[in-house]
Image: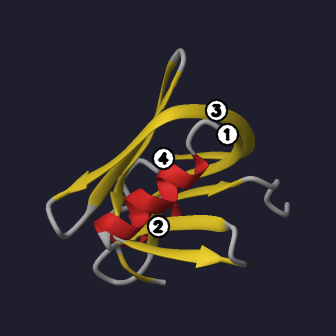
Amino acid sequence: MKPIEVEKVQQMLDIFKDKEVYVHLETTNGAYASHVNNAAYNVGAFIRNAKVFYNQAKIVGDGKSYRVGLKMEMGWIYAEGLTDWVIHENEQLLMAGHDREGRLMVSLEISEKPFRY
């Protein structure tokens, strides 16, 4: 993966716009929180191969981390804290947010085909 390039990521988001796509969205502090603070709450979310259709997509950020929002007819999907991206197998947009130690904190992936599970 490489650091997010806003213009290139936006171009990819627009390619998937107005199409039925599959989304993977994951957040975690999982084991990371308990390593630092035994009293910390572990939280996370995981959804894989959700079929969605979005009509607008936007990436915004401060140069350190970014938020990507996907606007659907009746709501939004968004991921915040994204730092890196890659095009996988020439057809999947993979974005992730890593902490200062390189550990995964958030992941948002978009594809026209289902993700392996």
Residue beneath label 4, please?
Answer: 43
Q: Is residue 97 left or right of residue 113?
A: left
Q: Say what amino acid the circle numbered 1 marks.
A: Lys
Q: Closer to us: mark 4 or mark 2?
A: 2
Q: Closer to us: mark 4 or mark 1?
A: 1
| Cα–Cα gap, marks 1 and 3 | 6 Å
Q: Which residue is at 14% across, 61% downward?
A: 62
Q: Say what amino acid the circle numbered 3 marks.
A: Phe
- Tell me the SS state at disc 4: loop
Mark before the other along the chain sequence, 3 or 2: 3
Q: Is residue 112 above or below residue 72?
A: below
In the foreground, 40 or 29: 29
Mark before the other along the chain sequence, 4 or 3: 4
Few, some or many residues within 10 Å of mark 4 (<14, 14–19, 20+):
few
In the foreground, 114 or 27: 114
Q: Is residue 5 left or right of residue 89?
A: left
- Tell me the SS state at disc 2: strand
Q: Say what amino acid the circle numbered 2 marks.
A: Ala
Q: Do callouts 1 and 3 mark residues in contact (Cβ within 8 Å)?
A: yes
| Residue 35 x, y percent position in the rendering | 41, 72
Residue beneath label 3, please?
Answer: 53
**Image quadrant of residue 94?**
bottom right
Mark before the other along the chain sequence, 4 or 2: 4
| Residue 51 x, y percent position in the rendering | 74, 37
Q: Could you say which disc has been placed on residue 96 in the image?
A: 2
| Residue 54 x, y percent position in the rendering | 56, 33
Could you tell me which quadrant the C terminus lies in? bottom right
Q: Say what amino acid the circle numbered 4 marks.
A: Val
